[in-house]
Amino acid sequence: MPIEQSNCIRRFVRTCNDGWLQGWHERNGGNLTYRMTQEDFDVCEPYFNLKGEGHEWIDLGIKAPSLGGQFFITTGSGKYMRKVSIDLTDSIGIVELSEDGSAYRKVWGLSNGGRPTSELPTHIMNHAVRAQATDGENRIIYHAHCPNVIALSTIVEPDARTWSRILWKSMTECIIVFPDGVGVVPWMVPGGAAIAEATSKLMEDYAACVWTQHGLFVSGSSFDDAFGLMHTIEKSAQLYLMAKAANGGAEPAYLITDDQLKAVCRDFNVEPNKAFLD
Ligand SMILES: [Zn+2]
């Protein structure tokens, strides 16, 4: 089977394209990584290539020993989500993490001297945190520039409780999709160790984090799971902004109440983050 037709590559490409179609990935905005299963590895490994230049080990600047030796599909630094489906090998690649989890090397793709996303250290750190928090189930880390989340972050304080309540109260099924709520990282310079650490600290408790005036950072056990979480949060932010604008800028009068949220959790057998409910 050509590597392009493997399940993991097809789903990766589909997710990049879905995000592009949603309007979340202007220019080279956003990035996606997937921690491969043994089955994915077996299908893709015949296509790995360590010959020629550009396959040397590169220091990550962080350490994730729990994921040492694992393989990740990643979008490329400076590459466009819009181009992934039409220029696959230039836009994405597969990297191997060193045994001690402190370095990576390219084993496939990013064919024109490309490098993995500059957020790779943030992604790997968060893969480690989420794998630990979910007994290894979590395999996706996805970052997008969702416009309504970014707009909302210009009018709401960067506080997890405030954000979670707004999102839960604007669309009934949100509390089922993210019962822990969302974490919020205050404005920070992207791409560095500081935002990686701040995000991974929050991802111990949340599957999703808002990056203030920047976008969203989510995790998931599958591409559908991660994309669905991103989509749900972005849509709820949009509904809140629409309702607020329609109400002349004042707080909407009929947001979902705390008692109604509790009733949803009871009937759907969901354990919400009680610290965020009154
Ligand atoms: Zn970004």
Image (cartoon, grey):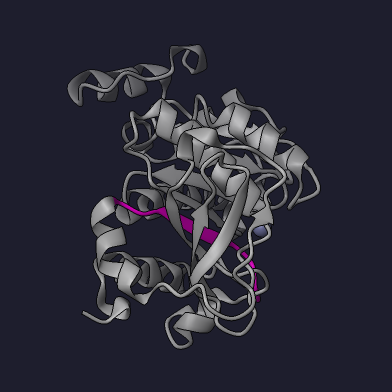
Q: Looking at the image, is 52 positioned above or below residue 97?
A: below
Query: Where residue 167 sits in the image (x, y, percent)?
Result: 49, 37
* Residue 32: image location, x then y, percent: 50, 59
Work out whether residue 166 or residue 75 is closer to the camera in this orientation and state it. 75
Residue at the right extreme, as displayed: 189
* Residue at horizontal 64 percent and vertical 69 percent from the top: 115
Q: Which residues are magenta?
A: 27-37
* Residue 243 seen in this snapshot: yes
| Residue 152 drawn at (x, y percent) | 65, 46
Q: On screen, 17 above or below 70?
A: below
Q: Toward the viewer: 5 or 152? A: 5
Q: Quadrant of residue 57?
A: bottom right
Relative side of 143 to 212, left or right:
left
The outermost residue toward the bottom is 86
Of residues 218 and 147, the one nearer the viewer is: 218
Q: Is residue 70 left or right of residue 203?
A: left
Q: Is the residue 239 above or below the residue 207 in the image?
A: below
Image quadrant occupied by the N terminus: bottom left
What residue is drawn where x is 74% and y is 36%? 186
Q: Kindly identify the residue that appears in the image at 55 percent across and 66 percent down.
A: 106
The picture places residue 4, in percent across and down from the top left corner, at: 32, 79
Taking the image as drawn, is residue 167 in sight? no
| Residue 127 in magenta stretch | no
**Horizontal placement of 57 versus 231: left or right?**
right
Q: Quadrant of residue 8?
A: bottom left
Quarter, ligand 1: bottom right
Q: Is residue 150 above or below residue 8?
A: above
Most extreme residue toward the front is 51
